[in-house]
Image (tube, helix red, strand yellow):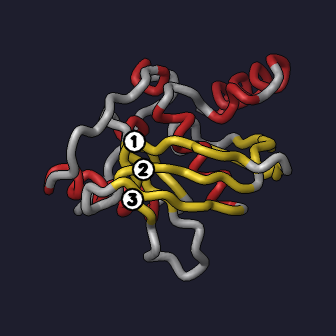
Amino acid sequence: MSVRTCLPWPDKRLRTKAGDVTEITDDIRAIWDDMIDTMEAMPGVGLAAPQIGVMLRLAVVDGSTERGKAVRLANPEILHSSVELREHEEASPNLPGVSAKVKRPRAVTVKFLNEQGQIDHRDFVGIEATSVQHQIDHLNGRMYFDRLSKVKRDMLLRKAKKQG
């Protein structure tokens, strides 16, 4: 297990849809372990494999206060989203130093392959719902700032460029 380096924006892999995971193997479990180590080192509440250059549909989410309760997801898919939205300040280690308020559904039901390779369903609420949606965006080649208006997105990217 080790902390991996996050790709710097605008690496083209961050704009590429990740490939499906066909089965859960020891290699996949090792990637998840590295992703959890990387997420904890940030510290963050989630990480998607493309953020560290692994182009597979893998994500980890841990919104617990005590930590160590990361959910490992392969091929996550949102089945249901709440109508009620929640605004949260989002950021990414791929574009450090900037963040923005993003509105997303407050709760989502997600279908995914778990660590045993079985199809699982889970309801995520609050910070974990925000994080799992953020990670699924990464798996689809989207960044959180794609959800902003053009003016806010351009301002955020200019600010990031100045800091870099």
Give the answer, above or below, for where 25 lies relative to 37. Answer: above
Q: Quadrant of residue 21?
A: top left
Q: Quadrant of residue 144?
A: top right
Asked whether 146 or 6 is in front, the reply is 146
Q: Which residue is mark 3?
A: 72
Check disc 2 and give the amino acid type.
Answer: Phe
Q: Which residue is mark 2?
A: 112
Find numbered disc 2 in the image and state the secondary structure of the residue it sits on. Answer: strand
Rendered location of residue 88, percent (x, y): 78, 52
Give the answer, above or below, for where 20 lies relative to 42. Answer: above
Left or right side of 98 for 37 = left
Rendered location of residue 111, percent (x, y): 48, 49
Rendered location of residue 34, percent (x, y): 29, 57
Give the mark toward the camera: 1 or 3. Answer: 1
Q: Which residue is mark 1?
A: 75
Find numbered disc 1 in the image and state the secondary structure of the residue it sits on. Answer: strand
Q: Quadrant of the C terminus?
A: top right
Label 1 or label 2, whichever comes before in sequence order: 1
Residue reaching furthest to the bottom: 66
